[in-house]
Amino acid sequence: MNLLVWTYHRVLPEASSGAVRAEIFEKQIASLAKSGCRFIGTSELEVFLKVKLPHTDKCTMLTFDDGWADNLIWATPILKKYSAKAVLALNTGFINKNSCEIRNSENYRMTNSKEALAAAAYGRDYSSFLTWNEVMEMKKSGVWEIQAHGNSHFGCYGNLDEIRGFYPDKQHWTMESALGEPPFPGAPRTTFRSILADSKTVLSNDLKNTLRQAKNENARRKLCKNHGSPVTTIETAEEFGKRVRDDLTSCRDAIKENLGQAPDCLFWPWGHYSDSSVKIAKECGFKMLFTMEKDAVTVKTPADKIPRIAAPANFEDFQRQLTIYSNPLLRSFRKMLP
Ligand SMILES: [Zn+2]
């Protein structure tokens, strides 16, 4: 039997990007519980990976990334109802420090995910995220264990090989770090990498200037294509190493200081990692590292690259993923497909 680790972000009463509706979330958890699935925490997963014996009982792990306040307000009551456990992968940079209240569905102001992330990324408003008091409340509920998701959650340009379009349409909230300034109309939309996985990059200054003045998308595409070095790395390997070490240490220390217990698992932002970031995370004391590579956990899974499956926002897709990845044969077939 394969073990699935699910990734959630938000649970909200209404549809929003990156969220599973509370009603659907309950259906998902209820179906797992009804099928006899046991909800395990990270220490049990660690034993599973160490012992390397195929386990016979059905197990699953629920993980929630970032630290959204709705995890307390809408997910917790449902998890309690089905005696389910879950792991909160907390990005300490997102913590809402402006308030110490413990909110509920009455006084929580709902903001869509894109706006909430953009506001938090630019340091303006963290109100969609948990306060330390709320995280403590979750820890004390017996439902949640709190683990690490870094202290910064930014991306930077990987390359400009596959341009999907240009800003300002569909602005991504991580772009400030990618561009070194707020996104400008004409900035390319393309692959990005977490700054906790690779050295920071910036878009070349002269390219930025010409993109700003370019008349249309075709001209912009040409400018990007013809530029010799559109993306420049601005950190040495040493600088990168120090920054990642400082980031992971500050995340770990903040959790220890506020909750009295240091995390020993790290969930990479967007699941991005590199050989050097994995090495640093282990040196910082993280025993298990989680990616977002879509797969099941088996006895062969290495503890430093644990795959997770993004929980779909609708029930049918959830059931489909569950069926495919729980079954060793179907999983192998799925992995052979592109
Ligand atoms: Zn995240």
Image (cartoon, rainbow, N blue to C red):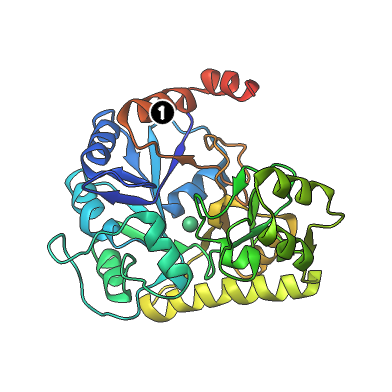
Seen from this angle, which residue lies furthest left?
A: 106
Q: Amino acid at mark 1?
A: Leu
Q: Residues within 10 Å of mark 1 (few under 14, many from 20)?
A: some
| Residue 154, placed above or below residue 133 | above
Q: What's the residue at 29%, 49% (across, down)?
A: 11
The local secondary structure at tag 1 comes to: helix
- The answer to whether one can see residue 90 in this image is no
Q: What's the residue at 42%, 69% (across, down)?
A: 120
Q: Tell me which corner region of the image, top left, top right, bottom left or bottom right, holds residue 229.
A: bottom right
Q: Tell me which corner region of the image, top left, top right, bottom left or bottom right, holds residue 218.
A: top right
Label 1 belongs to which residue? Answer: 322
Residue 328 in picture, x, y percent from top left: 53, 23
Seen from this angle, which residue lies furthest right?
A: 228
Residue 106 in picture, x, y percent from top left: 12, 62
Residue 175 falls left or right of residue 204 = left
Seen from this angle, which residue lies furthest front?
A: 215
Residue 182 falls left or right of residue 41 = right
- The answer to whether one can see residue 63 in this image is yes
Q: Which sits in the foreground, 50 or 287?
A: 287
Residue 129 in picture, x, y percent from top left: 34, 66
Q: Which sits in the foreground, 197 or 41?
A: 197
Residue 117 in picture, x, y percent from top left: 42, 62
Q: Which sits in the foreground, 95 or 219?
A: 219
Q: Quadrant of the C terminus?
A: top right
